[in-house]
Image (cartoon, rainbow, N blue to C red):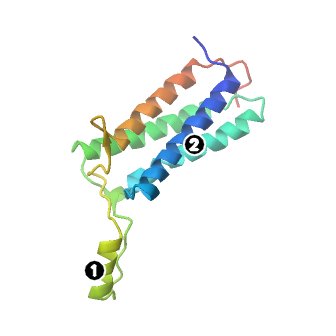
Amino acid sequence: MSINLKNTHVIIIAISVVSLLAAYLAEYIFLLAPCPLCVYQRFPYLIFIMLGIISLSSQYSYRKYYITVAIISIIIAFYHTGIERGVFELSSFCKPLVSVSDNISVADFKKMLYHKEIALCNKPALVIFGLSMTEWNLLLNIFLLTMLFMFKNKSKSY
């Protein structure tokens, strides 16, 4: 079964918007702090949305760009999953998003610790049905990549 090209753009935009909304909902409503890799995993969805909007107004396919972004997203999610599962060591990509200056007072440091959640790349903030948000993201990106290989490519590739 193949999927129409225009419908593919709309589906990718919708999946990307829902994914970003879920991430921001977890962060700002449920107060689950994202680690740096969680934040990096959001960028491909922003690129998918931009590509989708451009593709809807164009006669060209942009399929190879979608596929490239999906593969990069899978690599980031796979790496993050490996860190969560203890397969990979923590790297410099996983530095907490909180910085402490040299001349901070003890009171200010305590205040920062109590008011700012520090997320670690190797500790999932949320697990649903035994899978972390990172693992769900990995599965979603594998689905997107599979879908990209299924759609009809009648337009010129750009």
- What residue occupies the far left of the structure in this picture? 86
Check the image and report above or below for 155 versus 77.
Answer: above
Which quadrant: the N terminus? Answer: top right
Q: Nearer the viewer, residue 153 or 16?
A: 16
Check the image and report above or below for 117 versus 26.
Answer: below
Q: Which residue is mark 2?
A: 17
122 vs 148, left or right, is left
Q: Secondary structure at mark 1?
A: helix
Q: Residues within 10 Å of mark 2 (few under 14, many from 20)?
A: some
Q: Residues within 10 Å of mark 1 (few under 14, many from 20)?
A: few
29 vs 61, left or right, is left
From the top left corner, tell me how far across and down residue 33 is, in percent: 37, 59
- What residue occupies the far front of the structure in this picture? 29
Q: Which residue is mark 1?
A: 110
From the top left corner, tell me how far across and down residue 132 is, in percent: 32, 41
Instruction: Identify the residue at horizontal 71%, vertical 31% (top origin).
Output: 158
Check the image and report above or below for 92 versus 11.
Answer: below
Instruction: Identify the residue at horizontal 45%, vertical 33% (top origin).
Output: 140
Q: Nearer the viewer, residue 104 or 156?
A: 104
Q: Amino acid at mark 2?
A: Val
Instruction: Identify the residue at horizontal 65%, vertical 39% (top origin).
Output: 51
Q: Nearer the viewer, residue 19 or 152?
A: 19
Instruction: Tell me which label, 2 or 1, sits earlier in the chain.
Output: 2
From the top left corner, tell me how far across and down residue 5 is, in percent: 68, 23
Instruction: Identify the residue at horizontal 78%, vertical 29% (top origin).
Output: 59
- Which image quadrant for residue 91? bottom left
130 vs 138, left or right, is left
Q: Amino acid at mark 1?
A: Lys
Q: Secondary structure at mark 2?
A: helix
CA separation in Å, label 2 and label 1: 37 Å
